[in-house]
Structures are given as structure tokens and as C-alpha cells.
Image (spheres, rainbow, N blue to C red):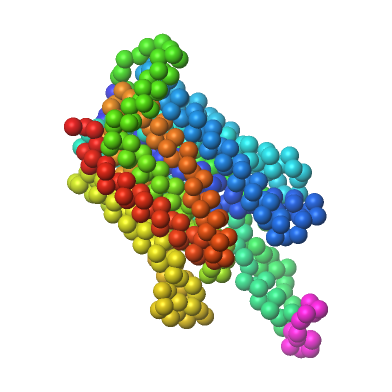
Amino acid sequence: MVSAKKRIWGWYFFDWASQPYSTLLLTFIFAPYFAEVARGYYMGTGLDEEAAKAAAQSFWGWGIAATSVIIALLAPILGAIADSTGRRLIWVWIFSAIYFIGAWALWWVAPGGEIGVLWWGVVFFGLGFIGMEFATIFTNSLMPSLSDSEDLGAISGYGFAFGYLGGLIALILMLGLFITAPQSDGNEMAGMMGETGAPLVEDDSLAGPELSPVAMEDAGPRTYLGIRPLLGDDSETMIGSRIVGPFTAIWFAVFMIPFVLWVKEPKTKSSPLQLGKAFGELRDLIASLKFRHSLSAYLGSSLLYRDALNALYTFGGIYASGVLGWSIGQIGIFGIIGAVAAVFCSWIGGRADRAYGPKPVITTAVIVLTLVCVVLLGMTREQVWGITLDPASNQPDVIFMVLGAMIGGAGGVVQAASRTMMLRHTTPDRATEAFGLFALSGKVASFIAPAAIALVSTISGSQRIGIGLPLIVLFILGLVLLAFVNAKGEQE
């Protein structure tokens, strides 16, 4: 007999196991790697570098958009089917297998290939992403069976904290074991070269001792932890970056074991699959939104602030690169700081959720994110809203690192509390359907923030205005709609 505590810990391990898909594949490792592979392909067709970058970004963007449409269309339907049959775990296993296959297949996205390689990467990334999203929907719907409703806020927050910790450790392992860090020796050597590439030091007596083979070996490529890459440094096949797909798949399979052993199907009434009944119940749920004012307001609010948050995650690194001139290494450190903050703040947010409920927690987190965007809107390397900075110092970098911690912390809190708020608008027997509708609301308008950023960037001609202004508007609109949400949901 599995204890209640083990069931909760088993449920936590799904977040731990699945988080690297977002951390490693969607954000920090595979997506930038894919952009480089696609850029190389398009430059090979004759495009200049800037045009190739745009084409690569477009290819990736349309792939993500198509995946989001599939998730948006199928999520509420599958949720209704699962609720009508009373079975959820079977769907977790199905989509876990899809997650594993999609992640593992990314190993074959190698540089120097034809257009088919790009299609392979987008299709299998999308397949794994669909697996992750749907497995998450059905896992979230198991929450009401874990504990009393008063404890679900804390459970949700602790789960997100545990998941972010897993993503953080996975990112550190990838950077520390496989990814080659920029070599300072190479940069120093470049600075010693003249325009023709010849060393500025021509006198052999001043050139220094010749390096021995052992010293040359020691001076070879190193990871971010200062060790030799486990798979070697191969700039042609990019093994160190490509391994992120199998690494993510193996991580998921290993850390799903506690979930498999400790999380069981909740005791609900099972019935044969009746598609007509499932679709009818889904249609009734959507039609009921015009009478369920709190749920309607919450879905609209979360649609806006979650879309803005996702854009903040997506464009944060782009902002750092374009406005502050950061390197990939600095952006990686930025990501680690944000993940660490997310771990601690999600845990604290879970306790606050249990004490005060999810609505004030969400409100506070969205206000913090809005203030972050206000700072971004008025920040350059030279000043922050008229306050002068030394562009040659690390002042702008420290400020943005602090903002990164705030984004990670508030983002983790708002996602965990949003999950609890959704539970307050449903019942245990319709939880999967409700989370399917929640996923639909998150995906159906996921184009709003990117499109607004592109439009404002074009009109203003400023990257920081293009990112900051639309996100401020979306967060504020989300707060306005949140004011119409009942703090207790529909539990009364």
C-alpha cells in the first residue's frame, strides 16, 4: 500500500523529470543550436548572414506555432475523453512515450544537412513538446486525489520548485559535462594577431617557450566546469550539443520511475469510452462560460499574463544580447540564476498559497513581472530611466542579473499558483477537462505577445521598447481581468 506522502512525492517527480524539456530543449540548448544549424543551411543556399538568421527564426517559429495549434485543438477534447472514462494514467503513459521518442530523435539533427534535417528537428521537437504538454495536463488533473483542497496550493508550489531544481541540475550537467565553453586563450591569441593574422611578436627570443604536447593537451577545449567534454569537442558534428536530446529523454525515463511506482489511478467511476458523451460535455463546459463569470475572467486573465510571461522567457536572452551585448555564456549564467530563484520562490509561493490562497499570490507575482518590464523599457548600458550608468562597468549586467532572478522567481510562483486557481474552478471528476481548457486558453492566443513585440519593434525601431511596452500592457490587462476572479473560485 502506497502512503499518501509517497503519492505526493511520486507526483512531484513528474515535474522533476519533465522540466528539462523546457530548460534544455526549448530555451537554453537545443533551440539556439537549431537556429545555428538552420542558419548554416540557409547561408549555404546563398542568403547573406542576416537573411539566413531571419529565415532560420521563421522556420522555427512556424514549427512552434503549428505545435501550439495542435495542442490547443486536442487538449480539451482529450481531457473530456479522459474524464468521461475515468482513466488518466493511461494517457500519461502514452504521452510520456511520445515525449521520449521526440526528445531522443533530436540526436539526428546534425549541422551541414539538407532541408530534411530541419524538418526532422521541427517535427520531432514538436512531437516531444506535445507529449510533454499533454502528459502535464493529465498529471495536473491528478492533483485533487493527492490531498485535501487546503493543501493543494502548497503541493503545487512545492512541485514547481522541485521541477525547477531538476531543470537547473540538468542544465548544469549539460554545461559542465558536454558543452564546450569559449576559450579565453583563443580570445587572447586573437588580440595578439595583426590584420594579416601574423603574431605581433616577431622576435623568437620574445615568443616564449614552445608548448609541450602535454601542455597543448591541457590547453584543449573545456566545459563550463573546466573539464574536457565527455564526448569530445567536435565542431563539425556538434556532438556536445546534439546529445541534449537523448540526455533529456534518459533523464525523463529515469526520474519517472518514482511516479510509476507511487502514483496510482484515483478511485473514480470508470465507464466505456463514449465519444458523443465526451464531446457533449465539452460543448456544455464551453457554453457554460457565459454564466461562470469567475472562470471566464480567470481564463482570460491567465491567457494574457501567461502569454506575456512566456514571451519574457523567450525574449529575455535576445534582449540581453541585443541591448546589453551579452555573450552566450552570460546568458547561460542568467538562466541558472533565474532557475535558482524559481526553486526558492516557488517553494515560498506554495506556502503563501496555502496561507492566503492563489489569487493574492498571482497578483503579487504579476505586479513584480510588470515592474521588471518597466525597468527593461527604460534601460540601456548607459542609463536606467535617466539614472546614469557606467557602460564599461558591470553595473548594467548586475541590474539585469537581478531582473533575471525576479523573472525566474515571480514566473515560478505565478505558474504554480495558476494551477491551484484552476483547481478552484473545477471538481475532481472534471479536472482533466478543465486543465485541457486551461491549456487551450494558454495556446489559442500564444501568438499575441510575439506579434505585438514584432509590431512595436518595427514601429519604434527600438528593441527595448519593442519588448518592454507590449508586455507591460499584457500584464496590466491580465491584472484588470484578475480583479473579477473570485478568490475562492467556484468552490463555494
Dividing the picture into quarters, in which one does residue 471 lie? Answer: bottom left
Left or right relative to 210: residue 94: left
Using the image, determine if residue 262 lies above or below residue 164. above
Split into 4 quadrants, where in the image is the N terminus? top left
Dividing the picture into quarters, in which one does residue 286 lie? Answer: top left
As drawn, which residue projects farthest toward the top?
272
Using the image, determine if residue 182 lies above or below residue 134. below
Q: Residue at x 49, y 34 (%)?
A: 72
Residue 369 on image: x %, y %: 37, 57
Residue 285 on image: x %, y %: 35, 25
> 370 or 326, which is in the foreground?
370
Q: Residue at x 55, y 56 (%)?
A: 455
Split into 4 quadrants, where in the image is the C terminus? top left
> 43 or 186, which is in the foreground?
43
Q: Residue at x 52, y 80 (%)?
A: 392
Residue 82 on image: x %, y %: 41, 21
Residue 144 on image: x %, y %: 28, 30
Using the image, determine if residue 280 lies above or below residue 9. above
Q: Is residue 9 visible?
A: no
Q: Residue at x 27, y 42 (%)?
A: 485
> 326 or 281, which is in the foreground?
281
- Magenta stretch: includes residue 391: no
Left or right relative to 488: residue 136: right
Q: Is residue 304 visible?
A: yes
Predominant SS of the magenta segment:
loop
The count of marks equals 0
Left or right relative to 90: residue 1: left
> 306 or 351, which is in the foreground?
306
Q: Which residues are magenta?
A: 194-207
